[in-house]
Amino acid sequence: MGVNPIVIIITIAYFVVIFAIGYITRKASANPMDYYVAGRKIGPVVNGAALAATYLSPASFLGLPAFIFLLGYPFWWAMVGIIGGMPLASVITAAPLRKYAPISFTDYYCDRYEDQRWMRILLGFPVLMGTWAYVVLSLVGTGLFMMAILRVPYVTAVIIGAVAVLFYVYLGGMVATTFSTAFQGMLMALAAVVSGIAVLVAYGGMPQMADAVYTHTPAFWLMPYNQPGAFSHPFFASWLGVIGFFFVWHFGFSTMPYSVVRFFTSMDVGSARKSIIWCTFFGSTMYWGLIIIGTAARNLIERLHPLMGTPMTMPDGTEGVVATTMHVLAMIRAEFGVGGVAVTDYSMIAAIESLANPWLLGLLAAGGLAIAMSTAAGWVVVGNVLLGRDWLGKVFNNKWAISNPVSSLRLMTVIILILGVYFSLDPLALVLDLSGWAFIALIATMGVPLVFGLWWPRATRAATYATVIVFFPLTIYSWLYARDVLGSPHWFFLSEVILGPDGRIATPHQFYWVFVAVIFFIVVSLFTKPASAQAIKAYCEDLQHD
Amino acid sequence: MFKGVRPYFWWGMGSFYSFVFLMMILEMAIPGLNFHFRLGGLPLAFIYTHVIGLSLLPLVIAYVLWRIPDREEKNKIAQAKEMNTGGR
């Protein structure tokens, strides 16, 4: 299949806009506050769109429709959980943190728990792990979109994506990141919703699409317990799988570093709250389209994809023709396969390809690049502040980093992106899967002390240390054990101990650790020394009211 | 713990969780609720999950969680102004 010039023109136009934003905002480097937090001048619409684009990654754009394609209707509730978690932040973290107005994500912990050195070092590890996983994931997403839709060689595609992110983050810091990310947020929502509408038009409406999906795959619509012994996927054989997927990402928006830092850039507390309305709007609009695409994908590909009916070599070596969705995806993967990328991750692209509309494919390419690059940039600005300001400047008192804050951040931006490209060239499946673990690990280890520090005077430094030290290794161990020994990170890691050798309990991404960490943090806090009265007043009680 | 959180937050999030978990329970208890039950030919899931749960309810809650404190803040400023001008 060739590439339509319209697709190329739309993609080039996207890159022109992104480079232009980076160039126009380059003066932000003159002022460190502009470079760190965009001078705290960002209005609610721009900040809301930027929040949505940063928070929602290629794991959303490619991964969530693929999850629906694989797991069926019950996964819709996971997407409701992600969007429904956004308003939580309005009261819980956005307003108090904007009032506090820090520069770095770790500043709050250091002030609230009165430890400027070890707290930054300790909290840095989970943040760096998240930065690594998400920068790699996002660069792989950039490469996949450019390769599968534009037929650009994968290595070239990853390098182009990284150079574009480097260009605008390096030149304009948080100002460039915010404006380019806001543009990307609007674009990705537009791409998803237009694609969703195009799918509905191809079927003649929502009821017709739903009926076609039912005729093709009746089990798609099953919820647990609807039919004895039947389910849409083994993960959804019981209510625990539905609830588990609902909660995996639910608390992330309020607590993950790459979304929380965007509250620091708002004009004021009211603007931070209002930006969440816009973020919810852009996020839910995008998810509206993604649900339709994911639901229709299997049926759509088998009905309309140009590769259907073409000759192919079967896995057993015999010659045959492409007859199923998995055949189509396997052929795409054989042609454009990258390291550990799952075959189903191509389902979103293949579904839209089936509609054979170059404008739609062009929009999808731009939207896909937008969501991938905006998340990469969001994590790069978290990582460069952590390494360049917090560690180099505050922990190690490096004179060059203290007297040249912008240069220090720029150096770290270059290092993070070089490492990101290196790990993206032949990505391990592990790295791509780790994004799910990163959510649980960061919410459990950093989110709990953040939220309780803001809202509970009794929260202690010892509990923060203990929670990070205990749950960082515990989340990764249980997740890896489930993935490598039980076959999926979505099985409870002690399933075999409880139910015997073949027993499986669905606990997606070991989500329960978040709730266990909350109980653990409360108990340890109750038995350890609280912060000073001044710290509690300044960083807990005073931040609770406008 | 969480004493400073205003009641409108608990009402907002309580309504969201109540809606979500009630619908999940109903879907598990009533086979075919999401697909075979229809409104104007449209499977019900497209209304309560796809529109209300995914978009409408979170948007309304996000709006309320901005609007109430915003109005309180404006009232506070107006009262302070009134006091400064001696109620004239």
Image: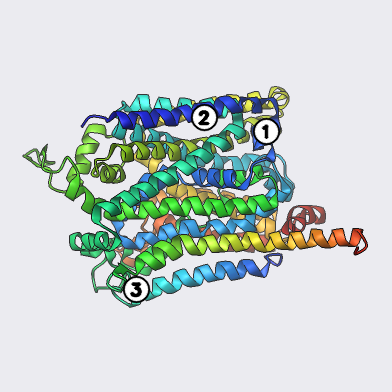
Identified by mark 3, the residue type is: Met
What's the residue at 25%, 73% (across, down)? A227
Is residue B3 among the parts visible in the rendering? yes
- Nearer to me, A207 or A512: A207
- Residue B5 percent across, percent down from the top left: 68, 65
Please tell me whether mark 3 sits on a helix, a strand or a loop.
Answer: helix
Label disc, if present, on residue A34 of the rendered structure? 1
Quadrant of res B51: bottom left
Identified by mark 2, the residue type is: Ile
Where, quadrant-wise, is the N terminus of chain A in this rendering? top left
Where, quadrant-wise, is the C terminus of chain A in this rendering? bottom right
Q: Chain of mark 2?
A: A
Q: Chain of mark 1?
A: A
Residue extending farthest right: B86
Please tell me whether mark 2 sits on a helix, a strand or a loop.
Answer: helix
Q: Which residue is mark 3?
A: B28
